[in-house]
Image (cartoon, rainbow, N blue to C red):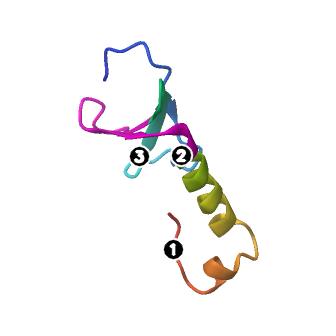
Amino acid sequence: MEGTDLNWRKSSYSGNGGGECVEIGKADCVLVRDTQDRTGPVLAFSTAAWERFAGQVKRLLAPGSRQRSQGHSRV
């Protein structure tokens, strides 16, 4: 997927130190790849599935989230 015309962008939760970074690309679906391995596997999600996933992550990471205060780690 490296040579495609997709407009990949680094996740806003990716740190500058590398390690656990992902990039998101948009085509007919939402694509996710490892920033450190751009020629490696790519996960594909329907737009609806990605929006549900992102919404759940945002709720879990929100200040005062019940799940977060119970010790669940970041997704």
Q: Which of the pair 9/42 is nearer the observer?
A: 42
Q: Sequence-wise, which precedes: disc 2 or disc 1?
A: 2
Q: Please determine whether, in this image, residue 34 is positioned above or below residue 55.
A: above
Q: Quadrant of residue 62?
A: bottom right
Relative placement, left or right, of 48 versus 46 is: right
Disc 3 residue crowd, few under 14, some 14–19, many 20+, Cα 10 Å: few
Q: Circle 2 sits on which residue?
A: 50
Question: Magenta segment, which residues?
Answer: 31-48
Q: Sequence-wise, which precedes: disc 3 or disc 2?
A: 3
Residue 73: image tag: 1
Q: Are dots 3 and 1 in contact, CB under 8 Å? A: no
Rounded to the nearest whole Å, what is the CA distance between mark 3 and mark 2? 23 Å
Q: Are dots 2 and 1 in contact, CB under 8 Å? A: no
Q: Residue furthest right?
A: 64
Q: Circle 3 sits on which residue?
A: 18
Q: Which of the pair 61/59 is nearer the observer?
A: 59
- Percent coordinates x, y for residue 38 in the rendering: 30, 31
Q: Quadrant of residue 31?
A: top left
| Residue drawn at x 27%, y 37% as measured from the top left | 37
Give the SS element for disc 3. Answer: loop
Give the SS element for disc 2. Answer: helix
Relative placement, left or right, of 55 versus 29 is: right
Foreground disc of the pair 2, 1: 2
Q: Sequence-wise, which precedes: disc 3 or disc 1?
A: 3
